[in-house]
Image (tube, rainbow, N blue to C red):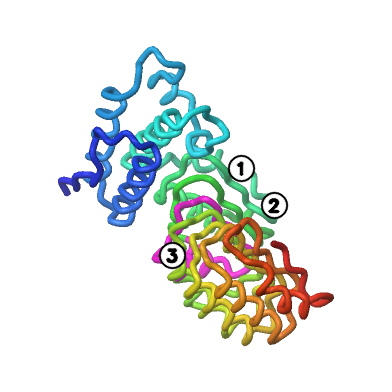
């Protein structure tokens, strides 16, 4: 397609506004799987960099494109000003879009990325600038490999794969029961939710650091929990979950006797959602740890009685 025009002005000066809108544009283009939209976005970002950034600054474009990794671009700890945060975000998008459009790797590159699978129980891939197509290649390679018989878990972190292909991979490899897709651009229509709907017998699921999951994704996880007897640990921290999502999870907890650990911190829900989770934890008594940390919006006093009732049964972290 010809691509959509990004819905923010090149002349916008507020770094927070720019960062938010750039992220929105990237997510929309990725979800649409529209290389044309990605190309337009890349062109506009390049124009903005030339227009607004001082080429003599300590953040020269050429050096950034050659050397920066995605985690550096997205982490505010690695930059010293709002201007640099926006700059790094844009460079990351340009790098990612280039990789997304040229989306496949050679068999040798995939083999090197995965490494020797003999005797390996966990496949870990972190910060390798992978696209959705790259992850599908990784999964296909592992599925074909005769050396992957011991594999029971995978951890994919800090790329932008959206968890592509994970539903088929789990269906083809039922021995894999531990899944981590952290900071991967997972959203509420990502394939992991197809795997859950199909009843994948997972023991651990970590979707932390994926704001696109939101309450819609939390509801899908809740539906999975209601009829599930295998999942022991669930991480949904920093997923932009609001009260409706937390309420759905709380109701599911009341029907689930298997889950022992739930991470729900750094989210957007308030006391209503927290109360629902605490109520669900108390209903069955299976949950041993509930993380509600990193949410200053929670008022502890109204929740104190519920937390006290769980003492000795479930450790509540907030």
Instruction: Give yes or no for contact between labels 2 and 1 (Cβ–Cβ under 8 Å).
Output: yes
Q: Quadrant of residue 291?
A: bottom right
Instruction: Give yes or no for contact between labels 3 and 1 (Cβ–Cβ under 8 Å).
Output: no
As rendered, which of 220 and 263 lies closer to the eye? 263
The residue positioned 61% from the left and 42% from the top of the image is 115
Q: Earlier in the sequence, mark 3 or mark 1?
A: 1
User: Residue beneath label 1, please?
Assistant: 115
Q: Position of residue 101 (x, y in %)?
A: 31, 41
What mark, if any, has residue 202 been given in the picture?
A: none
Disc 1 element? loop
The residue positioned 74% from the left and 83% from the top of the image is 285
Question: In the rendered image of this protein, does residue 230 appear above or below residue 144?
Answer: below
Alpha carbon distance from label 2 to label 1: 10 Å
User: Residue beneath label 2, please?
Assistant: 120
Query: Which class describes the residues within 10 Å of circle 3: few (<14), some (14-19), or many (20+)?
Result: some
Is residue 297 rendered to the left or right of residue 317? Answer: left
User: Residue beneath label 3, please?
Assistant: 191
As rendered, which of 35 and 294 lies closer to the eye? 294
Disc 3 element? helix
Span shown in magenta:
166-193
Query: Which class describes the residues within 10 Å of circle 1: few (<14), some (14-19), or many (20+)?
Result: few
Q: Earlier in the sequence, mark 3 or mark 2?
A: 2
The residue positioned 51% from the left and 70% from the top of the image is 171
Question: In the rendered image of this protein, does residue 60 appear above or below residue 288?
Answer: above
């Amino acid at each position: 397609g010809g691509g959509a025009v990004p819905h923010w002005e090149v002349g916008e000066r507020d770094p927070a506004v720019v960062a938010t809108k750039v992220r929105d544009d990237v997510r929309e283009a990725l979800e649409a799987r529209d290389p044309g939209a990605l190309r337009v976005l890349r062109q506009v970002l390049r124009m903005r960099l030339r227009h607004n950034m001082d080429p003599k600054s300590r953040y020269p474009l050429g050096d950034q494109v050659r050397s920066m990794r995605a985690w550096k671009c997205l982490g505010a700890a690695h930059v010293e000003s709002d201007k640099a945060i926006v700059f790094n975000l844009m460079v990351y998008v340009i790098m990612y879009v280039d990789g997304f459009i040229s989306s496949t790797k050679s068999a040798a590159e995939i083999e090197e990325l995965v490494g020797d699978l003999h005797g390996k129980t966990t496949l870990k891939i972190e910060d390798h600038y992978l696209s959705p197509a790259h992850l599908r290649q990784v999964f296909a390679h592992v599925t074909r490999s005769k050396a992957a018989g011991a594999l029971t878990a995978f951890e994919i972190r800090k790329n932008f794969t959206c968890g592509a292909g994970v539903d088929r991979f789990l269906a083809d490899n039922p021995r894999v029961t531990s899944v981590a897709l952290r900071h991967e651009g997972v959203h509420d229509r990502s394939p992991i939710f197809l795997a859950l709907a199909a009843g994948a017998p997972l023991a651990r699921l970590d979707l932390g650091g994926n704001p696109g999951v939101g309450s819609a994704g939390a509801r899908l996880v809740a539906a999975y929990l209601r009829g599930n007897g295998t999942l022991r640990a669930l991480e949904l921290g920093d997923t932009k979950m609001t009260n409706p999502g937390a309420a759905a999870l709380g109701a599911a907890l009341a029907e689930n006797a298997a889950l022992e650990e739930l991470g729900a911190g750094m989210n957007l829900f308030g006391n209503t959602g927290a109360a629902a989770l605490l109520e669900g934890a108390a209903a069955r008594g299976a949950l041993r740890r509930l993380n509600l940390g990193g949410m200053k919006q929670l008022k502890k006093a109204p929740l104190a009685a519920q937390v006290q009732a769980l003492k000795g049964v479930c450790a509540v972290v907030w």
